[in-house]
Amino acid sequence: MRTSELLSVAYGVYVAPLALRRHWGFERRKTVWSCAAMMVALPLAIAAVPQSPWTVVLRDWAPGVFILISHYASGALFAGPSTRFEAWLDGWDSRLPLVSKLTGLPSSAAAVFEVLYAGTFLVIPTGFAVLAAAGFSSLSDRYWTMVSLSEYVAFGFLPWLPSRPPWVVERLEPEDSSGVRSFGLSWVRRTSHGANTFPSGHTAGSLTVAFAVMPFVPLAGVVLLAIAIGIAIGCVAGRYHYAIDVVAGVAVALAVLALMGAVSR
């Protein structure tokens, strides 16, 4: 099996027993266990299928689906916030002058960052598409190992450090905004699980995409890095994440980059 596939299996094994810690009904636990089962069974099944051009393509892209499943598996483990941890996150936002500056951006600039934030999940498959188009499909496992590791670390803290994102705490409603801002809030309500991830998976994942692409397709890597920085700004400016979530997400991406460099050496 590929390393990225093993990471998916490991994450499925990690989240499955955590559902037993929560005092939920069977339906909620079933969601966690269904996601965990897919994260374990799908990589094993794909690895067992006889290799052909079509199955290789399937295998090259499948980890992106596993990451999406892990996002909802982790969200299903959110039973409510830790008031102490949430207050700690909010306290940092109150102490950092940069936060007030980002939340007070002109509407035109804020709209750009809203769009970048909303498009975060497109960045992950785009990174591999760039590598494949440039003739580096053989780097599939390296790419997905880096991105998966960043996302799984970010999502994996959620059951232990539960909190609500600022837009939930501050009761920001799409109806109270207009244009791109209204769309951004509607989008996050429809697509997210409503829990805050510390570290920020948006930041960690998008930065890692740029780091994975840059050595092989430098120009695209620089563009993806600029987009990742925009996503990080959008996390705070749109009140989708606390500032410390973003800082921790950057740390995760840098740690994964350092780890891959050490392994390569």
Image (cartoon, grey):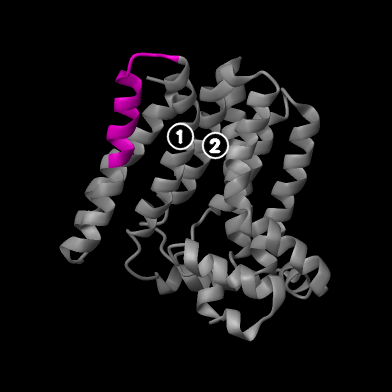
Residue 145: give x, y in percent of width and height. Answer: 50, 29
For marks 2 and 1, the one nearer the N-term is 1
On the rendered structure, is 42 left or right of 182? left
The circle on residue 63 is 1
Work out whether residue 239 can be spotted.
Answer: no
The residue carrying mark 2 is: 147
Judging depth in this view, the residue of 163 and 112 nearest the camera is 112
When the figure is inspected, residue 71 is found, relative to residue 242, above or below; the finding is above
On whether residue 47 falls in the magenta region, the answer is: yes
Disc 2 is placed on an element classified as helix
Q: Which quadrant of the structure image shows residue 138?
A: top right
Q: Who's the residue at 66% across and 69% down the image?
A: 238
The circle on residue 158 is none
On whether residue 157 falls in the magenta region, the answer is: no
On the rendered structure, is 12 left or right of 95? left
Q: Who's the residue at 43% across and 63% down the image?
A: 193
The magenta stretch is 38-52
